[in-house]
Every structure is written in structure tokens, then in C-alpha cells.
Image (cartoon, rainbow, N blue to C red):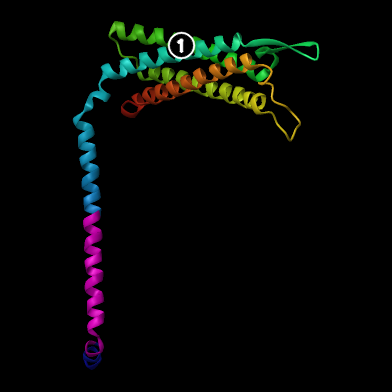
Amino acid sequence: MLNLLLKNSMSSPQDSIMDKEEAKAEKEKDMMSVSSENELLTCHAKFEAFPFFKTPRFLKGAKITLRLVTIVTTFIAMLCMLTSHQSTTMLGTPLDARYSYSPAFRFFVYANAVACFFIFLSLLATIVFYLRGACPTNKCSYLFFLNDMMMLTMEIGGCAAATAIGEVGLHGNSHAGWGSICGYYGKFCDRVTISLVFSYVSIVSLFILTVISSMNFKENPL
């Protein structure tokens, strides 16, 4: 009892003020946490108030549109690379620049050709499903998702390989003693650049398409 009285008598007004400030800080922290939770709930409610982006009609239109974009961009990228050749003369010696001289550019053409073909097949299958009014099963949806993901991976690999070779052709490599060739083959480099731009557009469309295709498994997993 005596110790408790001595402890109470030794406590200073400053300690009491500090305790009040700590309690006030804890209260403000709790209020901020509640406010953050309310903001998240409000944002979620706003998103749920506009469910247009979740409707089957929007998803069907998005899939068809993205597949069409992918087909067009991969075909243009392949065509530009196939027609990228230029001849010039150096010190009286005729020289050619062609895509077929580079394994990376050949792989780029093959990747775009395969992606264009398989996305075209998936577009036909998608249209057939929608015209018949029958939704594909979970396993069929998984095949669509797998097809889109594989084509996306192939496109990324082809673009990466072609971009690496194109960068060397544009800027050279001073450490290895490789000079730039775009100063001599400007037309060739321009067509390669256009091809790469269209191919990167196809990567973006394939990525969005893969995300949309994967949304089916969130509600209906295998």
C-alpha cells in the first residue's frame, strides 16, 4: 500500500500528459484505419455500380476485337519483315541486306506467322461458339487461355530476338568493333522498325486477351 502511494506521488504531470497524447494518437490511428476501409468499400461499390465491363456481351466483343487486332498486327509485322531487303554498293562491291541473313529475324517471322495462324483459328472457334449461343466448357475455355498464353510467349520471344539484332544494326557495338549498318541500309532498317512496332502492338493485345481469357477460371475453375 505504501509503495503504491509513493508511486502515485512520484508520477509527474508530464507523464499524465504523455499518456493522454499516446491515447489520442492511438485513437487517430484507429480512425484513419476505419476511414481507409470505408474508402476501399466505396471504390468497390462504385465499380459494382457499373458492371458493364463484366457483361458477357462486352467480354465477347473484347475477345473478338483483340483477336482481330492481333491477326492484323502480326500479319503486317510478318509482311514488313519479309519485304525488308535493300541492295547497295560499297567500294565497288554490291552488298545486300535481307531478313533471311539473320536467324533472329527468321525466328521473328516464324513467330508472327504461327501467332497469326493460331489466333485466326481461335477467332473462328470463338465466332462459332457465339453464333450457336453455346458457352464453351471449362476445359474448352482453358484451351483458349492456353493458346493465347502460348502465342503471347512466342511473340515476346520473337520481338526480343529481333529487337536485340535491330539495336546492334542501328547503333553497332563499339566494344566488339561492330559498326552501324542503318546509315547504309536506311530502307531496310525502316521496314524492320515498322515490323517491330506492329509486333509490339500485338503483344499488348495478346496480353489483354490472355487476362480476359483467364477471368473464366476465377468463377469456374477446372
Choose top left, top right, bottom left or bottom right for residue 94. Answer: top right
- Residue stretch rendered in magenta on the structure: 8-32
Q: Vertical placement of 35 versus 18: above or below?
A: above
User: As rendered, which of 75 and 44 lies closer to the eye?
Assistant: 75
Q: Residue 157: x percent and y percent?
A: 57, 24
Report if residue 120 is visible in the image.
yes
Residue at numbered disc 1: 72
User: As rendered, which of 117 and 144 lies closer to the eye?
Assistant: 117
Residue in view at x 75 percent, y 32 percent: 176
Q: Vertical placement of 162 versus 86: above or below?
A: below
Classed neighbour count for the residue bearing mark 1: other residues with Cα under 10 Å, few (<14), some (14–19), many (≥20) = some
Magenta stretch contains residue 71:
no
Magenta stretch contains residue 18:
yes
Residue in view at x 20 percent, y 36 percent: 45
Q: Vertical placement of 37 versus 54: above or below?
A: below
Q: Secondary structure at mark 1?
A: helix
Q: Residue 135: x percent and y percent?
A: 31, 14
Choose top left, top right, bottom left or bottom right for residue 127. Answer: top left
Look at label 1 and name its amino acid.
Val
Say left or right for 145 vs 165. Answer: left
